[in-house]
Image (spheres, rainbow, N blue to C red):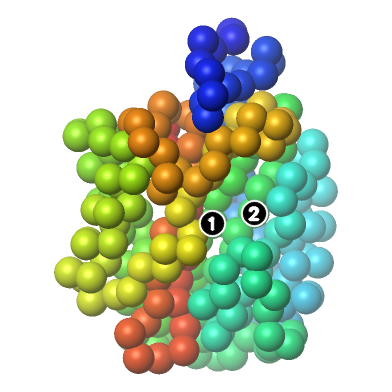
Amino acid sequence: MTMALSGKEAVGERYELESMRHAQQMTWKAIEQIASVITPGMRESEAQLRGKQVLSEMGMDRIWHPLLVRFGANTLKTFKQRSDGDPQLGEEDIFFIDMGVVWQGHEGDAGATFTTGSDPQMIACASAAKDLFDRVESFWRSERVSGVALYDYATAQAKAMGWTLNLDIKGHRVSDFPHAIYRGGDLGDLDQCPTTGLWILEIQIAHPERPFGAFYEDLLI
């Protein structure tokens, strides 16, 4: 179907909501598989290489944004920032995976945070990123507010939970590949309620005192 949308929510002729669901599901399967092979002692560069191998084995169309794996203090870095060095994952550590992959001509994009060991604050941080995402997603479903209002809500909720929300990360468009020709901008700048199956809600938080953070993103659908 061709969706009758314009401007920031325009899509191509091949766009299908069910294909977006498929891309979402495949991306999450890939994240789970990659996370399962990342172990203490591995370096960031090794984890990224292994991740690309997993994606190839799963039969992806292509990668549409670079696969990111961030260890330790690099979990505070935004997408556009380079990692510091090539750290080795510790026995008590935190890491996240962020991937954008095309499946059946449609863009999947998801990210999640994982921990090794039993550091309670790292575990709480990883859990909080997902919890905050769930709260904001629920607010979108129930209140049908604008993208701007979603990130205002996310900021307030993060503060109430005791975490710092990174507002340099404010979500973005996806659709049939390549979505970039539509120039939808950031979800956090959208002055209308985001349509289902077109927008990625990104949540990145920082620990208030220790040098690490957590990341979670998924399709609003």
Residue 195, percent from left and from top: 41, 27
Q: Eyeballing the image, is 170 above or below 91? A: above
Q: Is residue 42 visible?
A: no
Q: Eyeballing the image, is 16 above or below 114? A: above
Callout 1, which amino acid? Answer: Gly
In the structure shown, which secondary structural element does the residue marked by tag 1 occupy? strand
Q: Is residue 93 visible?
A: yes
Question: In the picture provided, is 206 more to the left or to the right than 137?
Answer: right
Q: The C terminus lies in which quarter of the figure? A: top left
Q: Residue at x 57, y 74 (%)?
A: 77
Q: The N terminus lies in which quarter of the figure? A: top right
Residue 85, percent from left and from top: 73, 87
> Is there a contact, CB below 8 Å, between mark 1 and mark 2?
yes
In the structure shown, which secondary structural element does the residue marked by tag 2 occupy? strand
Residue 37: mark: none
Q: Eyeballing the image, is 83 above or below 30? A: below
Question: In the picture provided, is 173 more to the left or to the right than 103?
Answer: left
- Using the numbered discs, state the Cα–Cα distance from disc 1 to disc 2 in whole angstroms: 6 Å
Residue that numbered label 2 is attached to: 99
Q: Residue at x 76, y 47 (%)?
A: 63
Q: Residue at x 20, y 34 (%)?
A: 142
Count of numbered circles on the image: 2
Residue 49, percent from left and from top: 81, 67
Decide which of tag 1 and tag 2 comes sooner along the chain.
Answer: 2
Residue 111: mark: 1
Crowding at dot 2, Cα within 10 Å, few <14 / some 14-19 / many 20+, comes out as: many
Question: In the picture provided, is 195 more to the left or to the right than 2?
Answer: left
Quarter-wise, where is residue 184 in the image?
top right
Residue 110, percent from left and from top: 55, 50
Crowding at dot 1, Cα within 10 Å, few <14 / some 14-19 / many 20+, comes out as: many
Quarter-wise, where is residue 104 in the image?
top right
